Each structure stands twice: as C-alpha cells, then as structure tokens.
Image (cartoon, rainbow, N blue to C red):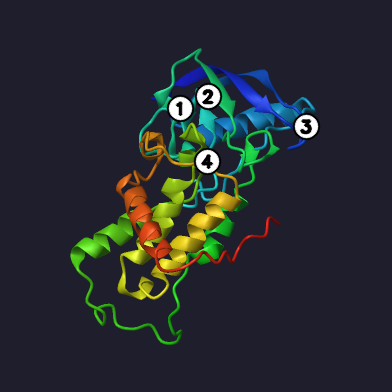
Amino acid sequence: MEKMINLNLKVWRQKKSNEEGSFQEYSVKNVSTDASFLEMMDQLNEDLIKTGKDPVAFDHDCREGICGSCGFMINGNAHGPMKSTTVCQLHMRNFSDGETLTLEPWRASAFPVIKDLAVNRSAFDRIIRSGGFISVNTGNAPDGNAIPIPKQNADEAFANATCIGCGACVSSCKNGSAALFTSAKMAHLGALPQGQVEKEKRALNMVAQMDVEGFGACTSTGACSAACPKEISLVSIAQMNREFMKASLNKKPEVQGGDMA
C-alpha cells in the first residue's frame, strides 16, 4: 500500500554565481514514499509554479544513476544518506514523515553556482580534455579477444570507468580536491594496453590541469571515496601519485587544456 509523507525543506536559493544566496523554507505535502528524491523536487516545483514562484533549479538527465548530471548535498551528505546511491536513485521511503531536509549545492570554488542547486562542473571536462584519451587507429572494431588483457587489469579498468563525474567527491572533501575523479579517469585508461602510449603525458597534463582549475590538494582523509556513489577506491589516488612522480622524473608538464572558458 502506498504511503504518503509530508516534508519540510530548507533549500539554497541563489539567482546567479555572482549574487548572494540564502536558504528558503518550503513544505511538500503528500509525497509518495515510492517516489524518487528528484520526483519529490518536481512536485515542489509544480507547487511553486502554481503559485507564481520561481522553481528550484537542479541538474538532472537520465535519472538512472548513470550520467552523473544530478547531485547536491542533503543534510550535509553528498547525494543523501544512502551509500552508493545517487540522488536520482534515492527514494523517499528512506525519510520520515515531518522530517526537515536541508538541500544545498556542491560546495567547491572550482564548482561555481549557476543557480540554486545547479553548479558548473566544466572543470571536470577540461581535466579530461587535457589528457583523458588514447591514440588508436579508427576503423572496424577489432575482435574483443585480439588483445589479451589480464583479468586483474580489466577489473581495475572497469572499476575506475564506473566514475560518472558527478562531483560528490569534490563536495565532500574538506580541501575541495578532485584527486579521486582525476585518478579514476587516469586509471581506467592506464590499466589497459591501449592507454600505455600516452600514460606519462596523461599523468602530467591531467594533474596540471587539476591544479589550474583551482581544486585543493588531497590529504587522504577518505571522505571522497566514502561519498562516491560508485565506490571508487583511494587506491586510484595512490596509483595516480605514483604515475605522476614517475612521469615527472622524465618530462615537464605540457598543459593542453588550460583555457578557462
């Protein structure tokens, strides 16, 4: 039987990145416990629109925990209280009737607020563009077994490739570090034979671009991995550090994606 609950929301409202914001309080009545968190937000926005008020802006796309578009802080937790769950896959059955929820955007200097709960995460795109690629000839797809890959390497590559770039790691880190995101993008290519050609250049450029974007330094507190909905391991950061140090002994960084557009 469907259960309905009522919620009190404290939502961060901010019109533009260069304007000050503040928390505004709202009540949402008769929310189905079968609804997702974003469906509850849709219900809030429908109520706001009906009364002639500006709806709350938040990022979303696939709503299946795949694209990494959605995400904000719920009671101080990235994506909310459930482990390994994106906010779009979080259901209202995990909350109690009459509960007060505080919603705010990712807090990081490299993620400026666009509006309300939506932030600009294009810094992640520039980190990937600076070196997150491999140089291979295009054409017909080769046979899947043409290049033997040890299972350990394949598992490592796939585990890191699950990173959806949502930004929960940055928002949960006290330093605003993007080390977990960057290391995951480096590791899923570096573990495969196709990624060996640019391995050193990738390490230098992506770490350099991460610094250019203004992300903080990693102090290995583990908050990033704990908040990651895909459970990317801190081992990836250690591997990134090793690759960067090794590459630094041989070459100087050549940042390719340093533009801040």
Specify the quadrant of the image occupied by residue 92. Answer: top left
Amino acid type for the residue under numbered disc 4 = Gly
Q: Which residue is denoted by mark 2 in the rendering?
A: 31
Whole-angstrom CA distance, mark 4 to mark 3, is 24 Å
Q: Position of residue 70 (x, y in %)?
A: 54, 43
Q: Nearer the viewer, mark 1 or mark 4?
A: 4
**Contact, CB < 8 Å: mark 2 with mark 1?**
yes
Q: Nearer the viewer, mark 1 or mark 3?
A: 3
Q: Position of residue 255 (x, y in %)?
A: 57, 64
Judge whether 41 appears above or below 164 on screen. above
Whole-angstrom CA distance, mark 2 to mark 1, is 8 Å
Residue at left offset 45%, top offset 78%: 135
Please state which of residues 88 and 239 is positioned toward the viewer in this rendering.
Answer: 239
Amino acid type for the residue under numbered disc 1 = Met
Q: Residue furthest front?
A: 249
Name the element at disc 4.
Answer: loop
Q: Which residue is denoted by mark 3 in the rendering?
A: 19
Q: Which residue is denoted by mark 1 in the rendering?
A: 92
